[in-house]
Amino acid sequence: MHAYSQDLRDRVLRALERGESPSEIARRFEVSRVWVYDVRNRFRDRGERCSHPIGGQRRSRIAHLEAGIRAWIQAEPDLSLAQLCQRVAQQGIQIKVAALWHQLDKWKLSFKKNAARQRARASRRATGTP
């Protein structure tokens, strides 16, 4: 979803200043009547003529634990995501495995957990397929 253009907002505000009704403005500019009211109220209450930014960057709840999590992984590289979640929970922050994985991926922390499966895969390649 994209914000309406600044030009459209300015035209709506000029039409409101001329005394046109929000219903007429909405019909003429092919926007919703509620949006016209929102533009008017934002300008009247806060003096803002522009749209609010869409989206944004949220800071992770575990961003302040990055150094600690890196230390845990370095000390015990075979920790699973579930075990990491438990350790984070001991710090007072509840986080799901998928959210933790997403944050570790942002931090470029990638490590293999199943050494047995890696060995099995390597041994098959060494012998070849019949």
Image (cartoon, rainbow, N blue to C red):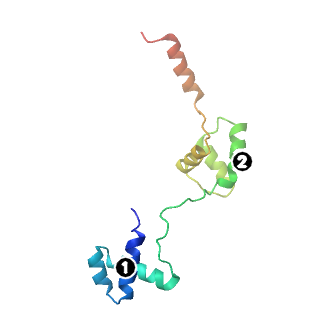
Q: Quadrant of residue 9?
A: bottom left
The kind of secondary structure element at disc 1 is helix
| Residue at image mark 2 | 67
Return the residue nearer the eye: 118 or 56: 56
Q: Residues within 10 Å of mark 1 (few under 14, many from 20)?
A: many
Between 7 and 58, the residue placed more toward the observer is: 7
Seen in the image, is 106 located left or right of residue 51?
A: right
Residue 92, percent from left and from top: 67, 58
Above or below 8: residue 68: above
Nearer to me, 17 or 60:
17
Q: Are marks 1 and 2 in contact (CB under 8 Å)?
A: no
Screen quadrant of the N terminus: bottom left
Above-or-below relation of 125 to 114: above
Query: Looking at the picture, which amino acid does disc 2 mark?
Result: Ala
Q: Name the kind of residue labelled 1 in the image.
A: Val
What is the spatial separation of the Cα atoms under label 1 and label 2, in whole angstroms?
51 Å
Circle 2 residues within 10 Å: few <14, some 14–19, many ≥20: few
Q: Is residue 69 above or below residue 118?
A: below
Placement of the C terminus among the 4 image quadrants = top left
Q: Which residue is mark 1?
A: 12
Question: Where residue 33 sits in the image (x, y, percent)?
Answer: 32, 79
Q: Is residue 31 left or right of residue 78?
A: left
- Residue located farthest toward the bottom when viewing the structure as drawn: 19
Identified at 53% across, 12% down, the residue is: 126
